[in-house]
Amino acid sequence: MIWKRPIPLIGDRTSAAERAAEVRGWAFPSTSKDAFYDLVAARRDIRRYRPDPVDSETLNRVLAAAHAAPSVGQSQPWRFIVVSEPEARERAARMADEQRLRQARQLEPDAARRLLDLQLEGIREAPLGVVVACDRRTPSGGVLGRATFPDADLWSCACAIENLWLAARAEGLGVGWVTLFDPQQLEDLVGVPDGVVTLGWLCLGWPDERPPAPGLERAGWSRRQPVSEVVVAERWSETTQAPLSHLRAPPIHAVVQARDDADVLLTPPGSLGLLDRYVDRVAAASGRSPGAPPTGALLLVGGRHRVAAHGVSAFSDSLTDDVLAASAVGESAGSAAATAVGLDFRAVDAGTASGDLVTTDALSVADVRDLIEWGRRIGVATGRKHVLLALGEVGIGNTTVAAALTATLLGLPAAEVVGLGAGADSAMLQRKVEVVEAALARVTAARGPGQLLPQEALAFLGGPEFCVLAGAVLGAASVGAVIVLDGLATSVAALVAVRIEPGAAAYLVAGQRSRERAHASVLVHLGLEPLLDLRLRSGEGVGAALATGMLISGVKLREGIGRTAP
C-alpha cells in the first residue's frame, strides 16, 4: 500500500523526488537573475551626494535587507547606528581627514600624493551616516561556529554591509565605505559600549555621480582581476606569490569626482590639485554664485605674554607694540601682504596675559570667555562682508604659548612641540622646552591628569590673541566664511575652536606650513594640507594672505575656464 507523504504545514514542503527531478527548480526566473547580476555589477563606492533627505520608508527597507544577512550561529551581531546630525558627521569627516594625512606621512612621496588625491567629502555631504557595529560581548564559545573561528561575528557584519549596499543600489541610493578612522575615536563618537567594535562609516544618500566603473579603475589605480586569477583549484601551493597590492597601503576608496561647479569645465576634474579642493570648500561653505567676485580680509591680532620674562624670545616685548603701530598706518608686513593681494586689513590689540604660565594661569576664565566672544563678533561681522577671512598674529613669546597649548591639547611632550621661533638659538630652545615642561607640570598638579576642556587650556596656558582668534574662527564659520590659517599660533587657535565646535573644521584652509616644529602635527590633527610650504617665519598673517590670494585666483581661474555641453 502506498501512503500519502506527510507534508509539513511550515518549512520545506518539497519532496526528495521533486528535488531530484528538477535540480534547478529553486532558481529564480531569468528576468530576476539578470536583474540581480546587473545589480551586483552596478554597485559602486560613492563619495559625492545630493543634499536631499532619505525618506524613512526607503531607509527602513535598506536596513531590513542588511538585517536579513547570514550570520554565524544566527548570532546577528550587527548594530546599525544611523547618524544624521551635521555636527557628528563633521566630527567624523575631520577624523577621517586626520587619518588620511597621517597615513600619507608614512608613505614614499608618490604613494603619499596618490593617497592625498582620495577625497572624503562624502562624509559631510551624504545626509546619513551608518556606522555598522559588531557586538562581540557574547563569548565565542557560546555561539555555534565561533569557537573555531572567533572572528566569524565580524564576517557576519561584513555580510550585512554587502546586503545594505546592494539594497541601497537597488533603491537608487549611493553608499561609500570609509575606514580611515582611529577605531577608538569612531567608537567614542557613536558611543558604543565596551566589547562593541565598529567596521567603519557608511555614507548613505542620493548619489551626485553615476560612475560607469569603479572609481579606482577610472583613476588608473587598479584593475578588476579576472576570476581565473583569484580561484584556486583544490589547494593553494605554498610557492604561490602574494597578490600584487595596487594601493600601496591605503584602503580602497572611490576617487571623488570634481564638484558640481567643475563638472562642465574644459579641464580634467581635479586638475588644480589641492587648490581645486580648497576652491570647492570655498564654494560649498559660502554658497557663492559663479561670477560673483570673491573678497577677503586679513585679521591681525596682537597679544602680550608675561612668559617672555623667562627668556623665551630673541626680541623685546616692545616689538609687539611696534608691529601694531605699523599696522595702523599700513606699514607692517601683514598689512603690506594684505594690500598686495587685495584684501581688507584690520589689526586689533587683544591685550596682555595676566600670568606667566610657569607660576600662574595665563588668563582668568572670565577673560577667556569675554575674549572669545569679542573674537566671535569680529568673525561674524567680517564673514558677512567677505567670503574669506585670513588670520594673522603678533605677540612676543607666543610660539612658547602655542607649544604649551599644542602639548596639552594633543597629548604631546614638550620636546616634540617646542620650536625655535624667530631668531632663537639652541640655548633659548632648551629654555623654551623647560618653560613648557614646567607649565604642563603646574597644570597637572592643579588640575590632575586628563584632557583639559578647550576654554580651560586657554585659561591655564593660553594668551589673549589665541582667544580672540579662536572666537573669530567660530564667528566666521557660523556665517559661512572660509578661514585661512597662517602659522602655528593661528592653527592652534583653530584647534581650540574645533574642540569647542567641531563643525568649524569644515570652514578651515591651511594657508601654509610654517617652520615651527608643532605646526605639522596640528595641521594633521585638523585634517588639513597646507597650500604653501615656504618655510616662512614672518608671522603677521603673511602666509595666510598669500594663500588667500592664491585661493581668489583659483576661483577666478575656474570661472574663466570654458564650459562644455552637459
Image (cartoon, rainbow, N blue to C red):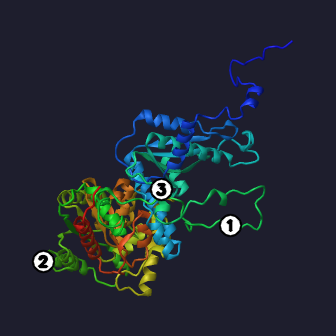
Q: Is residue 187 left or right of residue 274?
A: right
On residue 329, which mark appears? 2
Relative to the observer, which residue lies in front, 188 or 26? 26
Towards the viewer: 416 or 44: 44
What amino acid does circle 2 point to?
Answer: Val
| 246 or 501: nearer the viewer | 246
Q: Which mark is residue 213?
A: 3
Label 3 to label 1, Cα distance in Å?
Answer: 26 Å
Q: CA distance from mark 2 to mark 3?
A: 58 Å
Q: Quadrant of the C terminus?
A: bottom left
Disc 3 residue type (three-letter): Ala
Residue 343 shown left or right of residue 449 in the figure? left
Q: Residue at x 60, y 34 (%)?
A: 28
Q: Specify few, some or many for label 3: CA neighbours under 10 Å numbering under 14, 14-19, or 20 or more.
A: some
For residue 86, side relative to residue 199 (left or right):
left
Q: Which residue is mark 1?
A: 242
Label 2 or label 3, whichever comes before in sequence order:
3
On the question of residue 124 being in view, the answer is yes
Indicate the amino acid at tag 1. Answer: Ala
Local secondary structure at mark 1:
loop
- x and y, in percent, of residue 318 in the image: 24, 80
Mark 2 crowd level (few <14, some 14–19, many ≥20, 10 Å Cα): few
